[in-house]
Image: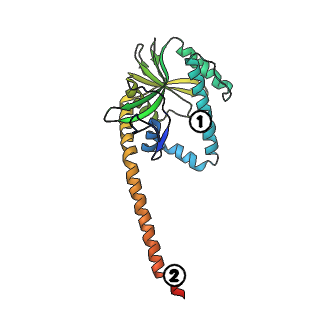
């Protein structure tokens, strides 16, 4: 298990992560996936064509953060702040609380740091638990009782493919047998199966891209700057109005 104390976030090459004790940068799982995976076409098109996309995204992020905090408080036996939650959100939290009442919670908001000589990454897993009864997912798969499961709360419109990679990275770090997503929808909380095998392959691919792309992008940028510089020099050499003051006197 690769669990660590909470570390301050730092940024490198447009990635958010943490520093190891010896100063190496461990990018976060979500940053790796944002960098290494393409944005779903429908989501990208919506962001491009909707003038209110930024505002809507910000409101959704605020709601998601509030829901996560409320569930975290409940799992820790603390009072939750419902300031940014709707009545439907509160009912959903209560529904999830009912589901979790009989399960064994092992950890909440666990900070992870994987540093195994091959991979170096960080993150924060929502919760880890052992179900006392079989859990049936909306697509028919069953998570058996007695296994270790890492779970994540999602308030998005869909359960996207990147979630499989995200949870696979957490499961690897926490040595979990299964993973699931609790999807908060207008009609209630839905339990979704996570394909850890496929998710792990996707995460490894995204990890490679997130590390290999920045140097190539920097090289491309230098090439672009070099071409622009050459063009400027060429323009200066051929434009008679670009003569120096000394040439004009």
As drawn, which residue projects farthest toward the bottom? 249
Residue 57 or 248: which is nearer the viewer? 248
Image quadrant in which the N terminus is located: top left
Residue depicted at 44% across the width and 14% down the height = 134
Q: Is residue 124 left or right of residue 173?
A: right
According to the picture, the residue beneath numbered tag 1 turns out to be: 61
Q: Is residue 187 above or below residue 10?
A: above
Q: Secondary structure at mark 2?
A: loop
Q: Nearer the viewer, residue 70 or 23?
A: 23
- The answer to whether residue 21 is above or below residue 245 is above
**Residue located beneath label 2 in the image:** 244
Nearer-the-camera pick, 77 or 101: 77
* Cα distance in 3D space between marks 1 and 2: 55 Å
Residue in view at x 45 percent, y 68 percent: 228
Q: Position of residue 99 (x, y in %)?
A: 54, 15
Residue found 38% across the figure and 57% down from its top: 219
């Amino acid at each position: 298990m690769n669990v660590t104390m909470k570390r301050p976030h730092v940024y490198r090459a447009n990635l958010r992560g943490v520093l190891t004790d010896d100063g190496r940068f461990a990018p976060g799982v979500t940053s790796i996936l944002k960098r290494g995976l393409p944005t779903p076409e429908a989501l990208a098109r919506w962001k491009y064509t909707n003038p209110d996309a930024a505002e809507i995204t910000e409101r959704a992020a605020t709601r998601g953060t509030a829901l996560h905090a409320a569930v975290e408080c409940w799992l820790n036996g603390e009072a939750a702040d419902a300031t940014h939650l709707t009545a439907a959100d509160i009912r959903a939290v209560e529904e999830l609380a009912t589901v979790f009442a009989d399960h064994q919670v092992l950890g909440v908001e666990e900070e992870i740091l994987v540093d195994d000589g091959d991979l170096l990454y960080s993150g924060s897993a929502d919760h880890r638990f052992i179900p006392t009864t079989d859990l049936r997912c909306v697509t028919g798969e069953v998570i058996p009782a007695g296994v270790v499961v890492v779970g994540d709360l999602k308030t998005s419109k869909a359960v996207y493919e990147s979630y499989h990679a995200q949870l696979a990275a957490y499961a690897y770090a926490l040595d979990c047998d299964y993973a699931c997503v609790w999807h908060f929808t207008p009609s209630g909380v839905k339990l979704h199966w996570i394909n850890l095998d496929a998710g792990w392959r996707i995460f490894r691919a995204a990890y490679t891209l997130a590390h290999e792309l920045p140097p190539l992008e920097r090289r491309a940028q230098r090439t672009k700057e070099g071409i622009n510089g050459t063009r400027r020099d060429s323009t200066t050499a051929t434009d008679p109005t670009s003569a120096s003051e000394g040439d004009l006197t």
